[in-house]
Amino acid sequence: MTKKLVLCDCLGSQAVEGDAIAKATGLGCTKLFTHACGAQIAEVAQHLGEEGVMVACQQEALLFRELAEEVEAPEPRFVDLRDRAGWSDEAAEAAPKMAALAAEAMVVRPPERTRDVVSNGACLIIGSGEVAQQAARDLAGVLAVTLLTPAPIDTTPGLAFDAVCGTLRGATGSLGQFDIRIDGFRQIIAGGRGAADWTAPKDGARSTCDVILDLSGDTPLFSAPEKRDGYLRADPGSQTAVAKAVLDASQMIGTFEKPLYVRLEEPLCAHSRAEQPACSKCLNICPTGAITSAGEHVAIDPMICAGCGACASLCPSGAITYDAPPVANLFARLNTLAGTYRKAGGSAPRLLVHDDDFGAEMISLAARYGRGLPADVIPLSVSALASFGHAEMLAALACGFAHVSVLLAPRSEGAVLEQEMSLANAIAGQDGVALLDLSDPDALSDALYTDTENKAVQDPILPLGSRRQVTRLAAKALQPEAEVIPLPEAAPYGAVLVDQDACTLCLSCVSLCPAGALGDNPDKPQLRFQEDACLQCGLCSNICPEEAITLTPQLNLTDAAFTQVVMHEEEPFPCIECGALFGSKSTVERIKEKLAGKHAMFANPDTIRMIEMCDNCRIQAQYHSQNNPLAGGERPAVRTTDDYLSKRRDH
């Protein structure tokens, strides 16, 4: 547990109000150091020897970790108050933001779930010419290298690496477990005088490797190649790119920890039922192809998953959730930031969401060389930008942020974030979320120093529960007077409309609904619907034989969304023999219309009457009918001893 905060004004370049931070966070603050990483480092070392210390300096984190190790103290935690708050044109007003950032840094992040990946150093280099051969020679002393060229190379046996030629037809897998297929495969024949001889070409060769270095300059072997662990690709015409790729490849040997980014709850998945298609949002958006269909649910290959988080944002049922860290941890950070800011005397803060790499560097450059961030803009770093979906955006607004800006990174899933932003703004009833596609630190500062007209909610929420629950809670806080909010197409919330004239109450939609939003009544012919449970997956409309169901994207904030509403009901049909109720009148009439006089089994009035009978009476009528297809021939007479003896010649 963090108890003390080590403060430094970085050679007098920022003003830090330790008393305000301590009052809002409950932390014990040290005196304000001026050169904590230099002239005053001995005093800082004394504080590091205490329990629960956090240092307000991210730049020199490595130095303070080494210092803590020297004094045999636990590794301290760190928070950046300088680049994100102190270095700013509005630094004099940044005390509430500093307090919020310090409090957010104290939120405990659950440990990541990981899986060990072993790479034994088997490296396949794809390319031709001197560039590929030199890369093979450079790596041969570190990795077990095989060079694949499109045609035999003019060389002699005894190379430091294996050389083969052929055409790579495909590759699957990731670091430590690549499977490759080669046609026209040829390899060097050891021995002999002069240039090397090569074997005859063969198709369908298969092999495995741990690392692939692609210097061919052709189309990448994988979609989103930069996100495939163990696959390195460089332009053979760029010496710098090739050198970097060779260096990276040389480090890919040993045991690595692969984070398990997402968690999948298969029973919640609405991918399909009874081989009928439904939701495929995650399949369509996954950039690496890590998600595949596995019957009624999807399957995720954790070794291929790059952790972009797009699938978790788009999943309507919550079957896929981002787990590095879990969404509950993000909700806690949002609530802490907004709550501490208000507690420290601030009002209507704005949120800037950015990734750990590009966004953090943009903020650092804007602070060091430009205007920095405004005093009311609180940065929030997330490991996967696309995982910050509509639920997280709405949670931020409902926690007390007046506006949310998402700074896009060059390789972030912009289409997903744009879709989630549109959905969040529709639910919030305002343009409370915006995307910033900027690459200039000064342009970032200029955009953020522009005031917004949004106001923070008066009664902030405590974001607890699933993403769907938090979305509903946030919508009620942001639009307290609204009852039903219309939403854009493909929204994961909504209702179904049933054409009562077309519906025959066959209830096929009820049996296949993956969320249980559609139900029946065992006592009477009814189709019921509970809107809160509907995922808008489209399965019901896809399988309806009468095409009587359409989807309506909306968010119903009334209590009626939690109750089952009768969408269609009919008068039950009584059996013409015993009077038992066994179906709906329209269904029986529809069957009679389609079969009577049009099917060989229903060519006469007696068989047509069976359609109007319950199961028991229908069986009885069928059994006693003259042309009973279930009846056998006459039973043979019982054979007795007399019959047997009468045929014996000796009797």
Image: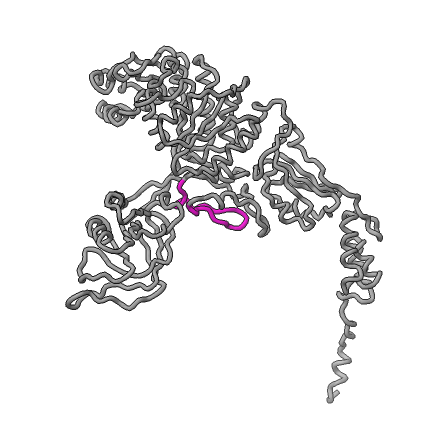
Question: Which residue of the protein is positioned furthest toward the bottom in this rendering?
Answer: 649
Residue 609, placed above or below residue 280: below
> Would you identify the image quadrant in which residue 617 lies?
bottom right
Is residue 129 within the magenta segment?
A: no
Question: Measured from the top left, where is residue 446 in percent x and y?
Answer: 40, 23
The picture quadrant where one finds residue 478 is top right
Camera-side residue: 53 or 451? 451
Q: Is residue 51 above or below residue 471?
A: above
Who is closer to the viewer here, 629 or 183?
Answer: 183
Q: Residue at 20% of width from left, 49% of height from top? A: 138
Q: How many marks?
A: 0
Start and end of the magenta stretch? 288-306
Task: From the viewer's perspective, tell me whether residue 558 is left or right of residue 223.
Answer: right
**Where does the image place residue 188, in percent across and percent down from the top left?**
23, 64
Residue 298: within the magenta? yes
x, y percent for residue 99: 39, 17
Residue at screen point 26% across, 67% down = 199
Q: Quadrant of the N terminus?
A: top left
Q: Is residue 348 above or below residue 620?
A: above
User: Which residue is at the far top?
Assistant: 19
For the C terminus, the image quarter is bottom right
Residue at 22% from the left image edge and 22% from the top image edge: 71
In the image, 146 versus 525, the foreground residue is 146
Does any portion of residue 26 appear in the rendered image?
A: no
Colour pattern of the rendering? one colour
Q: Is residue 317 visible?
A: yes
Q: Residue at x 53, y 45 (%)?
A: 280
Work out whether 317 lies above or below 207: above
